[in-house]
Image (cartoon, rainbow, N blue to C red):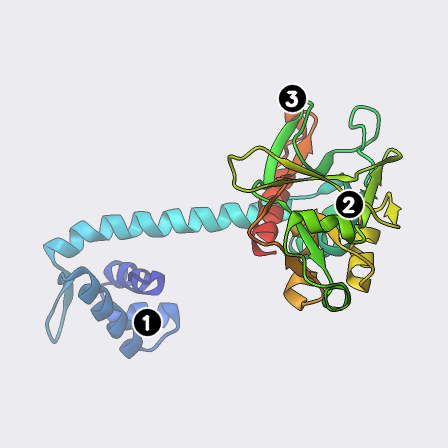
Amino acid sequence: MLRLDDLTVFVRTADRGSLSAAARELEISPALASAAVKRLEGELKLRLFARTTRSLRLTEEGEHYLRHAREALRLLKEGHDALMQGQETLGGTLKISMPSDLGRNMVIAWLDEFQALYPKVSFQLSISDRVSDMYRQPVDIAIRYGVQEDSSLIAFPLAPENRRVLVASPEYIKQHGKLNSLDELARHNCLRFMLEDVVHDRWSFYRDADAEPEVIHVNGNRSVDDADVVRRWAVAGVGIAYKSRLDLSADIRAGRLQVLLPDVLGERTALNMLCMHRSQVTPTVLQLRDFLRAQCEKA
């Protein structure tokens, strides 16, 4: 594999006509400079310099390759300069709305990392499970689960393959038994989410990706309009939750929650980042999109 340092030594040696002069300019030893040129020649399987005890000159192959090496270094420098300029210019205030569980337990920490990389960026956050009206509320970006009904919004997928999963704590499973089928949900305490005063007590599942949904009516002694509370109840061992895997990823990895019926597909609940207008899609927004997408892939 070609190394950037070797290309730099080669070009500087060709410019100065001397390995020792190139080494002094690059602040390395002549031995390291010589090794760099030999390594590059080995990778290319070409002789780049014709050497004698008194002189060093480019071979015909070296003359030809020098043009490509110069161009490669120029492009790399141009890319580096553009990146540095982007880091310097990314900034401004982003007003972001996000769901409660994902927002509190994951996105806030991700935004801390993003702000450390781009300190000129400021955030105003709205964390709620109520769907924000982007036409009435002062929001630049909405991070939302599910299919977007408003086709006028600009949607950037962050986790398009995310699905809901059934989970319970090891303590709950030990006390109430392992779930063997969807039909057994009827005898379990199911922790239900409420939105706009409507209790979501019908949970849909799929035997495979192309199957029709199997809808199960569930019951339980707790419901709440905050998805973070549903997760906390599940971790506390009071029932079974049916939530986005992304929300639960840290608890699943830590063993605080276990996935039930892993072979049954839950509802798809893609995560998207939404903007109202193309004019809002600034370099800062695009950089945040890429950053959040990478965090979702690692979660």
**Of marks 2 and 3, which one's residue comes earlier in the chain?**
2
**Measuring 14% from the left and 69% from the top, which residue is drawn there?**
55
Report whether 268 appears left or right of 56.
Answer: right
Q: CA distance from mark 3 to mark 1?
A: 60 Å
Q: Callout 2: helix, strand or loop?
A: strand
User: Would you say the residues marked 2 and 3 are in contact, meaning their CB atoms lie under 8 Å apart?
Assistant: no
Q: Is residue 239 above or below residue 204?
A: below
The residue pinned by badge 3 equals 151
Q: Quadrant of the N terminus?
A: bottom left
Q: Of 159 and 198, which appears nearest the observer?
A: 198
Q: Callout 1: helix, strand or loop?
A: helix
Report whether 233 appears left or right of 140.
Answer: right
Residue 87, given in percent of the width and then of the height, sits at 60, 49
Estimate how packed mark 1 is, as few (under 14), some (14 to 19) or many (20 or more) residues with alpha carbons within 10 Å. Answer: many
Residue 112, given in percent of the width and then of the height, sits at 72, 56
Residue 119, given in percent of the width and then of the height, sits at 70, 52
**Measuring 36% from the left and 74% from the top, which residue is drawn there?**
28
**Of marks 2 and 1, which one's residue comes earlier in the chain?**
1
Q: Mark 2 belongs to which amino acid?
A: Phe
The residue pinned by badge 1 equals 23
Q: Mark 3 belongs to which amino acid?
A: Ser
Estimate how packed mark 3 is, as few (under 14), some (14 to 19) or many (20 or more) residues with alpha carbons within 10 Å. Answer: few
